[in-house]
Image (tube, rainbow, N blue to C red):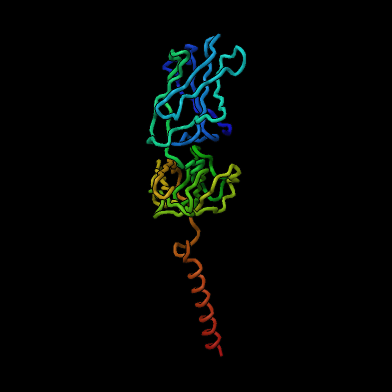
């Protein structure tokens, strides 16, 4: 199993303050929630001196998980996966939260709960909106955008659904849905962690009042919904362009102006002649 960041579980109310054993678990890779039918590893620290074995059990586990001391006399115990062990989440359970119990020689030393999500669930890293002329904010940053701003929206998923090349974002911020396309360029995200990038550009409504607004995307073929809050603040962004020159109609409008200028020039030359 690959190394991962621990998702800390509480051993019991006030356990850390009282110096009681502290139970934790990790998923397959950093930041991953534990999945149905997926691997999991447990650890416990703060065990009394002289403890020689700890066993972790849960209705979510395929089999009990034995923990051994990290070293001689250590108060920290870790999971050791031997040949033939099946230390993973059962494949026949529903997503949800399940109790976990650590015992030593039949005595309960710590309890906790483990959150289990559906197999193949999304692993959203960033889902952010930012001004197209500035560096994109990090996920969770409280940066604000102004009404009328041209913005970039990106989403990164370390476990995207097969065949999903575009996603749809909806928000009161926009006049309509925004399509995020797979692999869309984003100068603010190198995405060197193996994530798949979806991106798109749109304008924030000019008439939207200041406040907080939800921005929601549905992914994994309708199975996953992710929502972020976006702050709108400040005066509307002034636009020097005429309204009918904004967006996809600009090229058509410019072509019409050019044609008009040519015809007008011809008429003036004919009149002079």
Please state which of residues 251 and 268 is positioned toward the viewer in this rendering. Answer: 251
State the image coordinates of residue 17 (x, y, percent, origin top left): 48, 13
Residue sticking out furthest to the bottom: 273
Q: Residue at x 50, y 31 (%)?
A: 86
Image label count: 0
**Residue 216 screen position, x and y as percent:** 41, 46
For residue 31, say whether it is visible: yes
Residue 201 seen in this snapshot: no
Q: Position of residue 224 (x, y in %)?
A: 41, 44
Q: Is residue 188 above or below residue 10?
A: below
Q: Decide which of 200, 44 is in the foreground and name it.
A: 44
- 273 relative to 67, above or below: below
Return the residue nearer the eye: 53 or 206.
53
Q: Residue furthest front?
A: 84
Locate the C terminus by quadrant.
bottom right
Question: Against 48, is 112 above or below?
Answer: below
Query: What's the residue at 55%, 53% (across, down)?
Result: 183
Q: Quadrant of the N terminus?
A: top right
| Residue 2: quadrant of the picture | top right
Q: In the rendered view, does 94 fall on the left or right side of 24?
A: left
x and y percent of residue 127 in the render? 48, 43
Of residues 239 and 84, the one drawn nearer to the viewer in this rendering: 84
């Amino acid at each position: 199993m690959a190394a991962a960041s621990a998702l800390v579980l509480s051993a019991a109310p006030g356990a850390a303050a009282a110096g009681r054993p502290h139970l934790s678990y990790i998923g397959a890779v950093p930041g991953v929630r534990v999945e149905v039918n997926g691997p999991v590893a447990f650890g416990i620290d703060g065990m009394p001196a002289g403890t020689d074995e700890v066993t972790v059990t849960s209705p979510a586990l395929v089999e009990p998980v034995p923990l051994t001391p990290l070293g001689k006399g250590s108060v920290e115990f870790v999971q050791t996966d031997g040949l033939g062990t099946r230390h993973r989440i059962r494949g026949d359970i529903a997503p949800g939260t399940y109790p976990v119990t650590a015992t030593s020689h039949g005595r309960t030393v710590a309890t906790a709960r483990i959150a289990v999500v559906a197999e193949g669930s999304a692993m959203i890293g960033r889902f952010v909106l930012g001004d197209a002329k500035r560096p994109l904010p990090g996920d969770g940053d409280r940066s604000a955008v102004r009404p009328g701003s041209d913005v970039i929206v990106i989403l990164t998923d370390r476990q995207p659904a097969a065949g999903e090349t575009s996603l749809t974002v909806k928000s009161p911020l926009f006049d309509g849905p925004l399509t995020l396309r797979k692999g869309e360029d984003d100068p603010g995200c190198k995405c060197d962690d193996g994530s798949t990038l979806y991106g798109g550009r749109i304008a924030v409504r000019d008439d939207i009042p200041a406040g907080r607004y939800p921005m929601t995307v549905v992914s994994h073929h309708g199975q996953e919904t992710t929502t972020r809050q976006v702050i709108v603040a400040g005066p509307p962004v002034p636009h020097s362009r005429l309204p009918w020159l904004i967006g996809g109609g600009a090229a058509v409008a410019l072509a019409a102006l050019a044609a008009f200028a040519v015809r007008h020039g011809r008429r003036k030359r004919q009149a002079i002649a």
